[in-house]
Amino acid sequence: MINEFKIKIESLIGKPTNQKLLVAVSGGVDSIVLAHFLFKLKYNISIAHVNYELRGISSEYDEEIVRKFSKNFNLKIFVKRNSLLNEDTGIQEKARKVRYSWFNNLRLKYNFDFIITAHHANDQIETFFLMLARGSGISGLSAMEERKNYLIRPLLTFNKKSLINYAKLNNIKWREDKSNESDNYLRNRIRNSLLPNLLEIKSDIESNILNSIQNIKGANKAVENVCLQIKSSWTYKDNVIEIPESSFVKLKPLKFWIHCLFNPYGFDFKEVEKILNTKRGKKCEIKKYTLYRAKDMLILSEN
């Protein structure tokens, strides 16, 4: 299994040279195995762990096992304690923002080349259904990327079962996060209820969903390339973009292409359509941008 991982990580960041890697380790099997892989392959890694203090003594045990792992392999470790005990709603999203902001601060302060996270194939499938439930377009349904700038997810093709088997074979200790058993979060309900029922219907459904995600990624990339071609006819002047209507109004289906072109700026199809169907001077203003109608074009300005 480590040979398969070696091929994957080298395809993403190259062979171990002078890169400095910051590995996010929660104490769960996926992140512990990820760190073990990278250590065995002789990458220069440091460990980052966040203790949210949400599960009392269990959170302390998580931190302890990460500290022991780091000590056993003589790895530098960074630990952040950020209590979310008093948070009532949106805990998962707040926790995500806390850790990624901190990871990035560490990257900048200590000159890490990449941040490595342990998202695996099961996480990828859960994200797909999460985005599906939220009504996402093909960009959202593409789920997670293996590499996005300095953020690397090399385990997206490895399922959790294989990671557990590796940990057992190599006598690697890890902690099970009991909060994953709770159905308080939509992702957990997808993991604990939806996917097991789907597996009963079709045993190879996980691999088929992963194949579908790859197909959607390909379609999304093709759409992005077309959007780049369209935007090459737009005129960029400081904080203003002049957009000829002729560059997109004949595209079919128009709703889809307007979404692809204007959603990154925060505008939905109905807002753009309303401006297209009104006279010159009509505008729509959101938090960061203003879009208004001029003669034969739309003007997008940054507020």
Image (cartoon, rainbow, N blue to C red):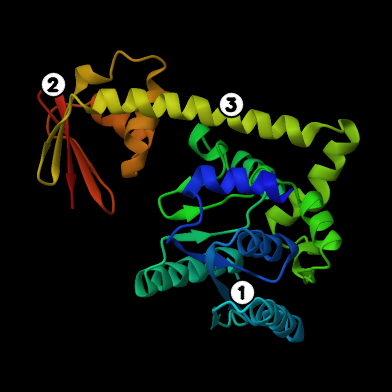
Q: Are marks 1 and 3 in contact (CB under 8 Å)?
A: no
Vertical placement of residue 178 versus 301, above or below: below
Q: Quadrant of residue 134?
A: top right
Looking at marks 3 and 2 on the same chain, the residue that comes earlier in the sequence is marked by: 3
Vertical placement of residue 215 versus 145, above or below: above
- Which disc is residue 163 wearing? none
Which residue is the site of mark 3? 215
Looking at marks 1 and 3 on the same chain, the residue that comes earlier in the sequence is marked by: 1
Which residue is the site of mark 1? 88
Q: Position of residue 232 (x, y in %)?
A: 21, 26
- Amino acid type of the residue tagged 2 in the rendering: Asp
Alpha-carbon neighbours of circle 3 within 10 Å: few (<14), some, or many (≥20)? few
Vertical placement of residue 92 versus 291, above or below: below
Q: Position of residue 285 (x, y in %)?
A: 24, 47
- Amino acid type of the residue tagged 3 in the rendering: Asn
Looking at marks 1 and 2 on the same chain, the residue that comes earlier in the sequence is marked by: 1
- Amino acid type of the residue tagged 1 in the rendering: Asp
Residue at point 72% right, 67% down? Answer: 28
Residue 145 visible? The answer is no
Q: Tell me if 65 is positioned left or right of 79 in this view.
A: right
Disc 3, SS? helix
Residue at point 66% right, 63% down? Answer: 31
Residue at point 28% right, 20% down? Answer: 248
Nearest the viewer among 223 and 259 is 223
Residue at point 73% right, 29% down? Answer: 208
Which residue is the site of mark 2? 296
The answer for how far apart the CA atoms under marks 1 and 3 are is 38 Å
Q: Position of residue 6 (x, y in %)?
A: 62, 48
Nearest the viewer among 60 and 151 is 151
